[in-house]
Amino acid sequence: MTQEIFKKKNVWLFDLDNTIYSPKTKIFDQIDRRMKLFISDKLKISSDEAFKIQKLYYSKYGTTLFGLMKNYDFEPEEFLEFVHNVDLSNLKKCSKLIQQLKLLPGKKIIYTNGDFDYAKRVLCKLEIEELFDEIFDIKKSRYIPKPKIKPFQDFLQDKKIDTKNCVYFEDLEDNLRPASKIGMTTIHICNERKIKIKPFIDFRFKTIINALDMINNSIKNL
Ligand SMILES: [Mg+2]
């Protein structure tokens, strides 16, 4: 796939955690620990057992929450509020990110398995909240998490957005597979050394800024 395709795009979809900000901030590690704490407290089990359940559900259902809702009578609101109650002081405003986001022509949407309030807090901390048209969170997704894309696809259809006009940035490979299947251009944000690029990944960049820099340059030069 060549960079030329970007001039035809006008909808930009961004995952939140570890995509819009770097995993080096360790924000998501805090969420991960709080999930374990929540499960061990609610189910009255050890933290090791809670961790096993957390990871089992995550791999089986896409999010730990969805597994908890399937297997126990869990109140999703309480869970979401608890796990997202994290310290965001490692998130810093980045003028390059702001500049590159502003240059992108068209709609910008956050597509996250987290909840709206948390996403909003992250965006505010980075001072980019006004640059986004929409936050599609786990509640809007009716708690059906990525990689399942149907709720989001319905939302796009509702807004009369053609998936072929969409570019999707995401750090988790599995979430890009269904997106590619429905016609989106997929961009994997990954700072690890990986040799192989899977067929459903169109581009890979180390950071969101690298990706946006390339895209904005190729739009400018075409
Ligand atoms: Mg992510």
Image (spheres, grey):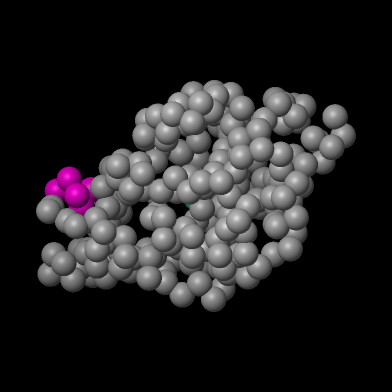
Quadrant of residue 49 in the image? bottom left
Q: Residue at x 41, y 61 (%)?
A: 117
Residue range highlighted in magenta: 67-71
Q: Residue at x 48, y 48 (%)?
A: 135
Q: Residue at x 56, y 41 (%)?
A: 13
Measured as percent of width and height from the top left, residue 92 is found at: 63, 70
Measured as percent of width and height from the top left, residue 18 is found at: 53, 56
Vertical placement of residue 124 versus 1, above or below? below
- For the question of whether residue 24 can be seen, the reply is no
Measured as percent of width and height from the top left, residue 24 is found at: 57, 65
Residue at the outermost right position: 221
Q: Is residue 58 left or right of residue 172?
A: left
Vertical placement of residue 75 versus 211, above or below? below
Measured as percent of width and height from the top left, residue 136 is found at: 44, 45
Quadrant of residue 114 in the image? bottom left
Quarter of the N terminus within the rendering: top right
- For the question of whether residue 63 can be seen, the reply is yes
Q: Is residue 52 magenta?
A: no
Magenta residues, dominant SS class: helix
